[in-house]
Amino acid sequence: MNKGGFIIRLIDITLIILFGFISISDIKVQGLIKLPQLVEGDDSQQQVIPLVIKIGRDHHFEYIENRKARPADSIVELETFFQESIARYRQERGNILVFIKPDVDSSVQITVDVIDLCRKYNLTKNLAFDYAALQL
């Protein structure tokens, strides 16, 4: 290979590397997040009613509604509280949101029973677990 061909080959490799760096550095990621908008009509009158269910380690429950706690000794008693709340808030056009707060030492099956109860009455549910207390 002669000197001219060797220089052209080096220029070719340099340009390939240069265009590679340009193509990598020129990537811009753009993401659009659609923000919620106010919906006009009957649904805008609905309110969200939070209910908190605390599950104790000894299979006892605490039902918190409007910052007032009521103890429940069984899942049947908890279901009665759900039925009362559903009857009360359906007339007020409210969406019930259930926060389930299990104790660290509580049984997983009890938490699943409460989730099944929410599913039975078609209630929106969420686990409100304190992950900081686990000290992982």
Image (spheres, rainbow, N blue to C red):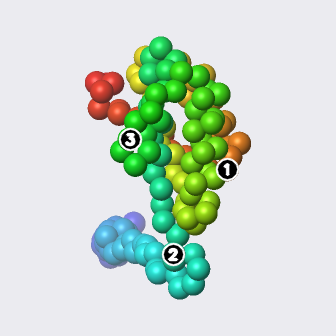
Q: Residue at x 60, y 29 (%)?
A: 77
The answer to whether marks 3 and 1 mark residues whose Cβ atoms lie closer than 8 Å is no
| Relative depth, front residue between 133 and 77 | 77
Kind of element beneath mark 3: strand
Disc 1 target residue: 122
Where's residue 7, x and y in %? 30, 72
Q: CA distance from mark 2 to mark 1?
A: 20 Å
Q: Amino acid at mark 3?
A: Lys
Q: In this rendering, which labeled residue sits more in front, label 2 or label 1?
A: 2
Which residue is label 3 attached to? 68
Q: Give the image location of residue 123, x and y in percent.
A: 61, 50
Q: Secondary structure at mark 2?
A: helix
Q: Is 127 above or below relative to 54?
A: below
Residue type for callout 1: Asn
- Of pointers 3 and 2, the one earlier in the residue sequence: 2
Compared across the picture, whether 82 is left or right of 65 comes to right
Q: Nearer the viewer, residue 77 or 10?
A: 77
Q: Which mark is residue 45?
A: 2
The answer to whether residue 32 is left or right of residue 86 is: left
Question: The N terminus lies in which quarter of the figure?
Answer: bottom left
Q: Residues within 10 Å of mark 1 (few under 14, many from 20)?
A: few
- Where does the image place residue 4, in percent across and percent down from the top left? 32, 76
Residue 15 shows in the view: no
Which residue is at 42% across, 24% downward? 103
Rendered view: 21 above or below 102? below
Task: Determine the residue positioned at 53% across, 85% down.
Answer: 40
